[in-house]
Amino acid sequence: MEQVEALDRRIEALRTEVRQALIAGDRDRVAALRKQLRQAQREWESLLDEELADDGKVPHVPAPRPAAGPLLPVREQVHQALTLLGAPAAPKLVVAVHEAFATGELTPTKLTSLRRDEERSFQSAPHARPYYLCAALTADHLAPARGLIAVSSWPMATRIIGPLSLRVDFLTSAIRLAGYLDRLAGTGAETRRLLWRFAATIPGAATSADAMTPAAVADAARAELAIHADADRSHREAAAKRAGEQLTVTQQLFGARLSGLAATGT
């Protein structure tokens, strides 16, 4: 029984690693982990057969199954989704990415207080974590951009939101998502729905969800991105420079309050 229970834990751990490798786009690791998972499941079945054959008794052994809830902390699930998108995103988009590629429930309500919790954690022990889920900053006031989550390890310019940045980030995320799906052996309904969410508003990306291909979506997004990229980069880099000069370390991650900026005359 101890061996069976140990394999239960091993199988659940392998499933978690497979999901992490899938989000990271590491196809070689996914293949290797799935091979280990299949072997562990075969061993589980073999051990269970031995238990059932022993003295004709039927022990109560729970079958290995996906966990009812997420095995990873919410902040790590959000970090994985944002890493795939490569740009600040709203909670609803983060949830959509999570649902397309991972298991376990993640809802926008779980993200409501997450940024405040991250800020309190940073203030109590600065840089104690490898990353923090932080704010995107508006280019004009360097204040927290409403409804967007970013990652502290990204360059400051990536976390700045200028006049063109929402569209540029949308196109950037579309390119990254399409490239990731293009590398996968197959795509499921959830991932195709997510990609169509982007493709439907990109000129020339696809005529319909059924006719959509990741490569075509990426090409169309690149074509539009080329129109906006230089102007957006200029806005972002100028604002990032001001942020480095005017803001404290904490404000660079979580934004300046407008009252604080007015008091300093900036």
Image (cartoon, helix red, strand yellow):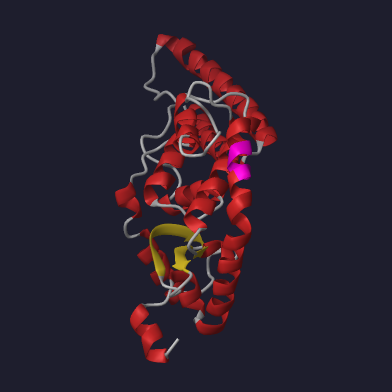
Q: Is residue 231 above or below residue 7?
A: below
Residue closest to the far bottom = 264
- Foreground: 45 or 251? 251
Nearest to the observer: residue 72 or residue 38: 72
- x, y (%) of residue 54? 47, 13
Q: Position of residue 98 (x, y in %)?
A: 45, 41
Q: At x 56% / y 39%, what residue is drawn?
A: 177
| Magenta stretch: helix, strand or loop mostly | helix
Q: Is residue 35 above or below residue 236?
A: above
**x and y, in percent, of residue 145 in the image:** 41, 64
Residues rendered magenta in the picture: 219-223
From this viewpoint, is residue 154 visible?
Answer: no
Q: Using the image, determine if residue 234 lies above or below residue 11.
A: below
User: Which residue is situated farthest in the left direction here?
Assistant: 109
Q: Is residue 67 magenta?
A: no
Q: Is residue 261 above or below residue 191?
A: below
